[in-house]
Image: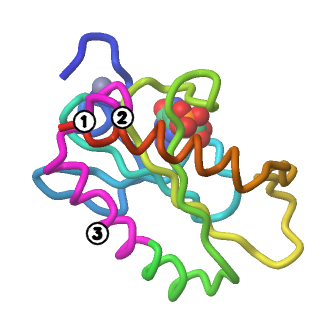
Amino acid sequence: MKEDCIFCKIANGGIPSATIYEDRYFRVILDISPANMGHALILPKEHFDNVYDMDPEIGSKVFVLAGKVAQCLKEELQCDGINILQNNEEAAGQTVFHFHMHIIPRYEGDAVQMGWQPGKTDQESLAALAERIGEKLQEVE
Ligand code: 5GP
Ligand code: ZN
């Protein structure tokens, strides 16, 4: 638990929340300002600021749980699609600095905005960048 972290408090039951699932590692809650009906957040009970310091064992469980939550939202809410996303750092839209994963049901014609303008590049630039990042990735434990 990190001092003054609201998601540490929510995840560990110190602050009440609309909880849809809980186990020893996670609490899954409904977002207080939902993008759409059924917008859920997976919160690890342990504090990680974001994906950079996420414990790999817990990280590997997050997506398994996300799949279950998505399946359940799909069946129960009959949504037309689901976005799963996770923001890291302010520049990427992170506002609460305790790792969390968004699971957002989508409905045909809804007003949720998410996306980017497709950019331009070329094969040479992609190959050079892939080599650079690939080499770096070999060093990551
Ligand atoms: P971020 O922008 O960091 O990826 O997402 C933070 C999310 O947490 C937002 O969607 C916001 O609505 C939600 N949120 C912030 N504070 C609370 C809270 O106290 N309770 C709940 N249920 N959701 C919260
Ligand atoms: Zn925390």
Of labels 2 and 1, the one closer to you: 2
From the viewer's perspective, is residue 109 above or below residue 38? below
Could you tell me residue 55's position as x and y percent?
18, 39
Image quadrant, ligand 2: top left
Q: Which mark is residue 136?
A: 2
Under circle 1, the secondary element is loop
Name the dominant secondary structure of the magenta segment: helix
**Which residue, given by chain and number where applicable, does mark 3 sit on?**
64
Residue behind mark 1: 140
Q: Is residue 86 magenta?
A: no
Q: Residue at x 35, y 55 (%)?
A: 28
Reading the chain from its start, which is encountered first: label 3 or label 2?
Answer: 3
Quick check: 88 left or right of 55?
Answer: right
Could you classify mark 3 by the number of other residues whose Cα lies within 10 Å: few (under 14), some (14-19), or many (20 or more)? few
Magenta highlight range: 48-69
Label 3 to label 1, Cα distance in Å?
A: 23 Å
State the quadrant of the N terminus: top left
State yes or no: discs 3 and 2 in contact (Cβ < 8 Å). Answer: no
Look at the image and tell me in which quarter the C terminus lies. top left
